[in-house]
Amino acid sequence: MEKKERIFKAQSKQVTLDRENRQKLDYNIGRYDQAVERGVHFFSDLDNARSQASNIKDFAVDDLENLLVGFEKRALENGSEVFWACDKREALAILKDIVLKEKVELAVKMKSMISEELEINKLLQELQVETWETDLGEFIVQLAGEKLYHILTPAMHKSRGDIATLFHQKFGLDPESTPEQITLFVRDYLREKFTRADLGITGANFLIADTGSIALTENEGNGMMTFSWPKTLEVIAGIEKIIPKLTDLGLFWPLVAVHGTGQHVTAYNSLLSGPKQMDELDGPKRMVIILLDGGRSRMFGDPEMRKALTCIRCGACLNACPIYRNVGGYTYQTTYTGPIGSVISMYLDDSRDTGFLNFACSLCGRCSEVCPVKIPIHRLLLLNRSRINENSDKGATEKLVYRTAGEILMRRRSLDRIPAKWKNLAMKKIGHKHWGPNRKPLNFAPESFSRMWRRRKHNQS
């Protein structure tokens, strides 16, 4: 068993038995569930909206090369600089060159999963650049020396009391501070950082092919500050973020909002179409866009796995997943967690040894039901499982055992032929370890259901 898989199993057991942590997750995700339940009624025909979004993203992925080339052409016409990065090393090299040439001393960052994927903060720390996360949730986990717990809500694992205690330790705030008081403090604290920042760093919710624009959506206004004040803006986006037309945002922005937070639309929606023009007062003098592959072309080249590239990172599948709600985000040991993270991580450069996550799934299908672009996530998990098993180096004996067990379990008559006492003995000797010591023992009834049914039917006749 690989190291990451051992850690995953150990941490899963530990976190699942931590009732306090599970209560925090249940409470925080429960609030999202309630908001989303109200928000979906914003759509008169949600299924039709999801189908349209799915079709648009499918088209975008199928025509990925042409759309990206078109985006680059128009972005260059807008005055932006566009770079292509095959992997993490190339992306960080571009960033490093900008930092050194611009003599950056202070950088501010808008919430971005791709920033976590590339570990940008680590590079900036090595270059002795003062760096601040400006999203409140990311700011909290940065202070705590932690990573993001959830792709939408970075500090989902923390309660109000946890956060108040953290700000008391770091800044001397009242340990009984309310969320409103903490928010006002952070706003004032970061405002000074924004005004002094040399570099702003953002991701991209969408890349607009027909205008060469970057679409950003957020709720706090920190994104607008990140690209308004610093003289240089760096946008890093995965190549899968492309959508064909500006008018497509009228569909995608509400879908992201409703499935993420339950809002009809998020508070701040911005379009960046190049650096500041002569007649504009705000904005960066230089805008650099880095388009990252980082393993995404592996999924693009796979006709069955290509659908995973249509994800719009709303976080709905994480909130719906019973596994995620029990084991939390850190146990995955990947940038992208939950069901969609389990699917894509084994293809991405930074997490290619995480194939085991595809087996951390109950196959309930809830993730596929809630996906706003209709990704059949549970089917992709099954597909990955099948491929992993086909390429595994399990011994002939183990494969024989699984094959025999499968043949028996798939046939009711074969299973009924085995006496209950033999089944219980097998569970006691072999199955208990895999069944789990914290679950009640599985005891087979002396009489099977099918035999009981035949007997009752016989007695009635």
Image (cartoon, rainbow, N blue to C red):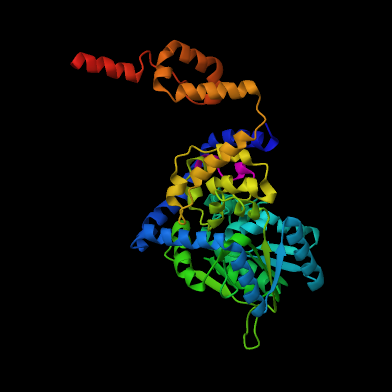
Drawn side of residue 345 relative to residue 412, left or right:
right
Can residue 3 be seen from the camera position used here?
Answer: yes
Residue at 55% of width from left, 24% of height from top? Answer: 402
Q: For the magenta stretch, what is the residue range? A: 325-334
Seen from the viewer's position, the closer of residues 402 and 172 is 402
Farthest bottom residue in view: 279
Q: Position of residue 363 (x, y in %)?
A: 47, 39
Residue at 72% of width from left, 61% of height from top? Answer: 85
Residue at 68% of width from left, 41% of height from top? Answer: 353
Query: Residue 333 in magenta?
Result: yes
Query: Residue 142 in magenta?
Result: no
Report the quarter where the C terminus lies: top left
Quadrant in the picture for residue 92: bottom right
Seen from the viewer's position, the closer of residues 307 and 362 is 307
Q: Is residue 7 above or below residue 110?
A: above
Quadrant in the picture for residue 62: bottom right
Q: Is residue 429 above or below residue 164?
A: above
Can residue 226 be seen from the camera position used here?
Answer: no
Q: How many marks?
A: 0
Q: What kind of secondary structure does the magenta stretch mostly adopt?
A: helix
Q: Position of residue 309 (x, y in %)?
A: 56, 55
Residue at 67% of width from left, 79% of height from top? Answer: 79
Q: Position of residue 40 (x, y in %)?
A: 38, 58
